[in-house]
Image (cartoon, rainbow, N blue to C red):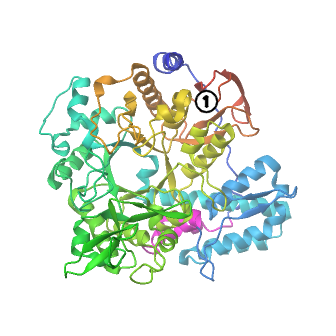
Amino acid sequence: MARLRGVLSAVLSLLLLAPPSWSKGAATAQLEALSGGRLPASVFDGSRIRANGAEWLPDAKDILARGTKAPNGRPILPFTFNLTDGGMVTAPSAGLEGFYWAEREIRRIHGKEAVMHHLKDYFSYIDALLAPVSWSGEARAALRQIAAENLSPGERYDRLMAFVSDYTDRLRRSVSAADAAGWARSARVYELFPRAYNLRGRRQARGGSGPDTGKFFADCTEDDLRDIQQKGFDTIWAMGILPIGERNRWGTGGGSPYSVRDHAGISPDLGTIDDFRNFVARAHAVGMRVIMDFIPNHTSMDSKLLQEHPEYFVNRPAGSGEPPRGYFEQTAPDGRKLWIRNGGYDAWGTRDYWTDTAQVDYSNPGMRREMVRIVGSWVSRTGVDGFRVDMAYQVTNAYFGRNWAGELGAPLPRREFLEELITEAKSRWPGTAFLCEAYDRFDDLSNIGFDLIYSKNNIDRPGGHTGLYDALTSKDPGWIREALKRQSFLDWQRGGMSQIVFTGNHDEVSPQRALGPWMAGATFLTLLMPGAQLFYGSSEIGFDAAVPHEHKPIPFSVPVSVDWQSAKPDVAAFYDQTFKVQRWIKERMGETVMEALPPDGYPKWVGYLLWPNTPKDGAPKAVAVLANPTDETVTVEFNHPRLGAHRSTLAPYGYNLVSF
């Protein structure tokens, strides 16, 4: 870690103490709009689109990234390009954004001649995307006009792609301006576990003070929130704040926060609903947002919902003897004995259980409405800004139906429960964001309306999906590079769900354990990305209280209080300095977009470029974030058309920031 501190100190002395004078580069080359004045301006008029009805935003997102529906009711899939050399490329998403992104990359590498044979297919695909949307008539007419003009195939190809570029860009800008929950796409989320956070100890470590009733939400002040905000975070995820069940509670630390007795209540150890509402108001006063957990798949075994409505749960009449594995006995309000399923989940094709929970039944309309009501009540009562939805993919029809086939009280409705929930919540509170903890069903969850998904693992889907966390822990440069490419696209696109990157959270082992000597390089690479970030509170001091039977840095099974006085100096210095670099990029370059590096080849190093959305005089044209996930010294070499040649070296597990 001493070596890491030296590297960052050198970077900071360059960036913070004596910033060099960079020359402003040429403007970014853009595709020329070859319409020649023949396309009506209203084709691109976002205000005119918005005037066509309240449904324009989801329609626009479908056109851009999620895919509209074909006449047979099936979703339109990502376009697959067959190259003349026999290769095949599937767009990273359905819709115009994925199509445009993939075509642009193919043209860069192979030239348009590799795919010009697809010209008629392009017209058919784009028209099929637009056809189901009522306000797309003029755009479809513009396509027909391009198809009918007396042009050579090459000219027609250029004219069409210029139209796609312009139309996609303008539609993206309209969506960005109208999506009130779009803030989540760049949220810097600080996850804190109030039960273990030790507010008093944190204040003592930084020489502060404040109220000390022992109730976190009553005690946490604006100064406490500013202390977090100054590290670059703009959103608090207050994790584990709901009352925890007592029946079959495991461990001595207070139980799992995901075995919830009352989805509509606050743990009395942390304060009252009024205390939480005031906490949210204080966060808003300092310019921060607050998100909280929603746990849709299950409740505790003694939950209020189960006691009042056992019919809301997967159940069957009790038999004789002990309940079989995966069941527990419950007495209904009318005196009947029932066997209730424990909360279950699909684990690599087999069902397993959380044995301190009860399984919700989403074939029951009453249960659906109650959960929708509860989520709405949190927003209306407290002003909370969003929800991290626990194990969301297990509640999709694909997983839920498979897990509980033959055991539900009624046929599962065709409509996704989470789509019903998010649609209703956003219709009333458009700025409410939804983040899903999910490891599968990417496209289902994007279509449902989620704003963000965990960037953890690879997911099998058309066009592929490579998660960053597993790639980082693998230390495989090729895997990491694919994850960076996927992140570049998802951060750029506006129609579909993006993802939130992290090197740790309450479920994973500490970054030090997960990454070893690669911890600083992987974290540096992650923290400087421009999209949504998740950071687990206490990681900044290297805290790790894992026990042999529970790998979490803050275990649920034993009592834990973060010891802020025990900060590991090298770890704390690394995070402090990296947060400063992050702030420097923000202050000098503003909002940035990410381009994965290298553009070609398969070297052992990884990295990306950050480009400012709006170039500023005296600011870098771009910066490169570079890292070496291997245990050997590597040479970094690339030749970028806008930046020229670069060559440097990185020590084993080293990292660097280079300005242009």
> Residue 613 or 200: which is nearer the viewer?
200
Q: Is residue 617 visible?
A: no
**Residue at 61% over, 60% down:** 168
Q: Is residue 475 above or below residue 488?
A: above
Mark 1 secondary-structure assignment = strand
Q: Position of residue 191 (x, y in %)?
A: 36, 43
| Screen quadrant of the C terminus | top right
Q: Is residue 69 above or below residue 152?
A: below
User: Mark 1 — residue?
Assistant: 627
Q: Is residue 575 visible?
A: yes
The image quarter in which residue 44 lies: bottom right
Magenta span covers which residues?
Answer: 38-66
Q: Is residue 373 above or below residue 659?
A: below
- Is the magenta region chiefly helix, strand or loop? helix
Q: Is residue 478 left or right of residue 515?
A: right
Q: Position of residue 601 (x, y in %)?
A: 76, 38
Q: Is residue 462 left or right of residue 240?
A: right
Q: Categorize mark 1 by other alpha carbons within 10 Å: few (<14), some (14-19), many (20+).
A: many
Q: Is residue 251 left or right of residue 167?
A: left
Q: How many marks?
A: 1
**Residue at 38% over, 37% down:** 547
Q: Position of residue 561 (x, y in %)?
A: 27, 35
**Residue type, numbered disc 1:** Ala
The image quarter in which residue 98 lies: bottom right
